[in-house]
Image: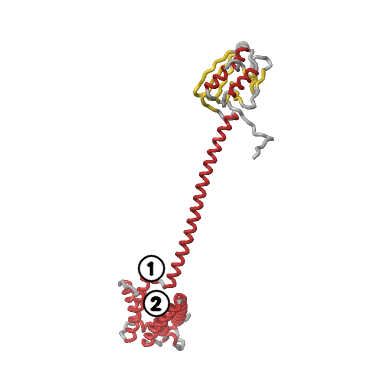
């Protein structure tokens, strides 16, 4: 409940405030957001499994974001930034899908 | 990663129960942590959405910028080349048009000159009008021919007698009954109305010289009247058939 409220409040805050993303963060923010979404999906799945642990959630959230940003950063340094961020996005997308499928199976047994 | 953990398959109702319990508003450390992280996520997502909406070059990577620049360069040079080709085409068309106009003008002038000389178009200009009367009906075709000869010698550029345009191929013939003349197959009876375009005074003088054409007319019992005019219109024309055998030597 509080998590949902937090999500809504965050979106509202982001929309309401005129935040300029610092230039050095610009390539990483979209990847970081998708990585965080992946962590969220994983947390939702663990919740339904009865295995939710806030410590694990926090760690996975930040490690996801950091690893994704790090990959993109390394890709940028190697001159394959756009390709590598595509690769990261594909992997994260697959993970979100599989987590969503898992959640669907638990809730609807289908 | 929580999602990496494996658990015994939960039944559907157990999963729903856990979901319901999680949605119950309770202030625990776990809920607060999750809420905080979700707030961060929501904020980041919304900020990114707004950033995308701005759509400028500032968020492109260097290699993407280079690519955009390359594309623009290639596009510019392609357009440049197209512009050049179109300009060349335009110049070509313009010069074509000019030369075609000149050619058309020259052709029109040639048609006019040759049409007047060949008698295929009506002509006007200074000249004389000559009436030859023949009360005794004694004039012969030879007298008429002499008249034409005299006019041509005097520089007449276009001649007609009655409704007939006199050209290079014109012939004169006495008609069977006598006292009239057949010109190019048209039988003409006196008085004969001649029109000639040329220098009026020269024509008048040439016809009037002693022993000349009008003298011959008078000898045969005819009389004549010459009127010099500033504007003689010769509307009689000669219809020419295109040559069947002869072709031009280029």
Out of B250 and A61, give the one closest to the viewer. Answer: B250
Left or right of residue B208: residue B179:
right
Quick check: B133 above or below A25?
Answer: above
Left or right of residue A34: residue B170:
right
For the N terminus of chain A, the quadrant is bottom left
**Residue with the mark numbered 2:** A28
Q: Residues within 10 Å of mark 1 (few under 14, many from 20)?
A: few
Residue A40: percent from the left, percent from the top?
Answer: 39, 81
Disc 2 secondary structure class: loop
Quick check: B30 above or below B127?
Answer: below
Q: Is there CB contact under 8 Å for labels 2 and 1?
A: no
The chain letter under disc 1 is B
> What colour-coding does the image apply?
secondary structure
- Picture quarter containing residue B192? top right
Residue B9: percent from the left, percent from the top?
Answer: 46, 87
Out of B40 and A74, give the one closest to the viewer. Answer: A74
Measure how far apart labels 2 and 1 are at the Cα level: 16 Å
**Disc count in the image?**
2
Residue A83: percent from the left, percent from the top?
Answer: 47, 76
Disc 1 secondary structure class: loop
| Disc marking residue B56 | 1
- Picture quarter containing residue B110? top right
Quick check: B150 above or below A77?
Answer: above
Residue sitting at x 68%, y 35%: B246
Residue B38: percent from the left, percent from the top?
Answer: 35, 80
Residue sitting at x 54%, y 36%: B108
């Amino acid at each position: 409940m509080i998590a949902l409220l937090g999500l809504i409040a965050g979106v509202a805050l982001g929309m309401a405030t005129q935040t300029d993303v610092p230039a050095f963060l610009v390539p990483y923010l979209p990847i970081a957001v998708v990585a965080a979404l992946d962590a969220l999906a994983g947390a939702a799945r663990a919740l339904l499994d009865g295995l939710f642990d806030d410590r694990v959630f926090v760690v996975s959230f930040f490690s996801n974001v950091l690893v994704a940003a790090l990959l993109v950063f390394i890709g940028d340094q190697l001159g394959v930034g756009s390709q590598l961020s595509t690769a990261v996005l594909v992997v994260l997308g697959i993970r979100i899908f599989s987590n969503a499928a898992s959640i669907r199976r638990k809730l609807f047994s289908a | 990663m929580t999602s990496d953990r494996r658990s015994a398959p939960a039944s559907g109702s157990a999963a729903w129960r856990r979901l319901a319990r999680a949605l119950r508003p309770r202030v625990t450390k776990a809920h607060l942590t999750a809420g905080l992280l979700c707030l961060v996520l929501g904020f980041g997502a919304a900020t990114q959405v707004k950033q995308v909406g701005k759509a400028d070059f500032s968020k492109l990577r260097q290699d993407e910028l280079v690519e955009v620049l390359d594309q623009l360069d290639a596009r510019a040079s392609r357009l440049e080349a197209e512009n050049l080709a179109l300009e060349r085409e335009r110049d070509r068309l313009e010069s074509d048009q000019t030369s075609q106009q000149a050619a058309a003008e020259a052709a029109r002038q040639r048609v006019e000159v040759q049409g007047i000389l060949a008698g295929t178009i009506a002509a006007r200009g200074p000249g004389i009008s000559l009436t030859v009367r023949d009360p005794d009906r004694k004039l012969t075709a030879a007298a008429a021919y002499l008249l034409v000869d005299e006019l041509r010698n005097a520089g007449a550029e276009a001649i007609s007698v009655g409704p007939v345009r006199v050209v290079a191929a014109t012939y004169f013939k006495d008609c069977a009954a006598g006292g009239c003349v057949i010109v190019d197959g048209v039988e003409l009876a006196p008085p004969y109305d001649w029109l000639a375009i040329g220098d009026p005074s020269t024509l008048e003088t040439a016809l009037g010289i002693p022993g000349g054409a009008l003298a011959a007319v008078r000898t045969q019992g005819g009389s004549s009247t010459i009127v010099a005019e500033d504007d003689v219109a010769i509307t009689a024309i000669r219809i020419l058939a295109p040559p069947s055998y002869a072709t031009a030597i280029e």
